[in-house]
Amino acid sequence: MTLSHDLPSHLLIWITRGQGLLQLDGQRRGLGAHNAVFIPARSLFSIELGRQGFGQAVVIPDGAPMRLPQVPRHLRIRDVQAQTELTGLIEAGQREQQTPRPLSNDALDAHAALISVWLRRQIMQEEHVPDRRSAGIRLSARFCRMVSECFATGVPMATYAETLEVTPTHLTRAVKAATGKTAADLLTERVVYEARDMLSTTEHSAQSIARHLGFGSAAYFTRFIQQHTGKPPSKLRMAKV
């Protein structure tokens, strides 16, 4: 998950050991044990966990009949009872998934609903009220949302800046300060992730994928992939993202 990307489903990540870095909602943050990260569908993010890091992930389909936060959230859970409760809910869902029984889908929906209640209860706690964000971080978040929506169009960075009503230089400076990466870096990572995913999980030709991602030609797409992954598209066909 080190490349910036987004998913069609909601994602809850529960870190129980280790440290790492999280890029979410246009901002880079430190990750540690007992951190819960909620990532709504189509929200740009990346996670880098250290070698000792360990966590669990809950995938909730977009449109599931339950109430979920509308914005990304990163919560540091200090209450031991709350930590134990979430771990228990996730493990109960895993057991249900691993042991097929009648009505297992209904049971999984119920477990996901309980997890959503846990999440919303934590968000209501005063200690989890988010800090007021600077103008630069707000701009970075808007840019990241735009990347998720427009990365496959092939539009230049100047178009992103114009849409956000800032200069390309200001946009790059703000995103770099908030995430540690330039605006162009984040856009490139999102395109590379999509290209690798399509090459390794579909039978679409490189030319078709290039066209889908807004490249002018298959040759330009091949050079782009070679430059950013060290491998030509044909080699990525045999690799997983």
Image (cartoon, helix red, strand yellow):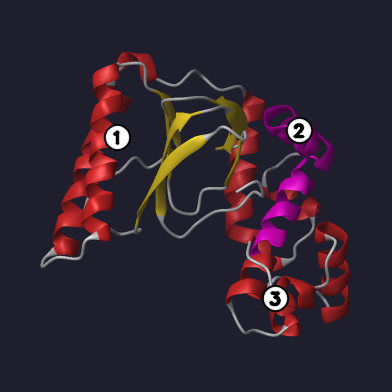
Q: Tell me the residue at 63%/72% (across/down).
A: 200
N-terminal of the pair, mark 2 or mark 3, is 2
Residue 53 coordinates in the image, percent (x, y): 54, 34
Residues at badges 1 and 3 in contact (C-beta under 8 Å)? Answer: no
Q: Return the residue found at the far left.
A: 102
Seen from the viewer's position, the closer of residues 6 and 88 is: 88
Residue 67 in sight here: no
> In the picture, which quadrant includes the C terminus?
bottom right
What range is drawn magenta here? 167-194
N-terminal of the pair, mark 1 or mark 3, is 1
Q: Tell me the residue at 83%/66% (across/down).
A: 231
The residue that mark 1 highlights is: 87
N-terminal of the pair, mark 2 or mark 1, is 1
Q: Tell me the residue at 49%/54% (across/down).
A: 42
The residue type indicated by label 1 comes to: Thr
Q: Is residue 140 magenta?
A: no
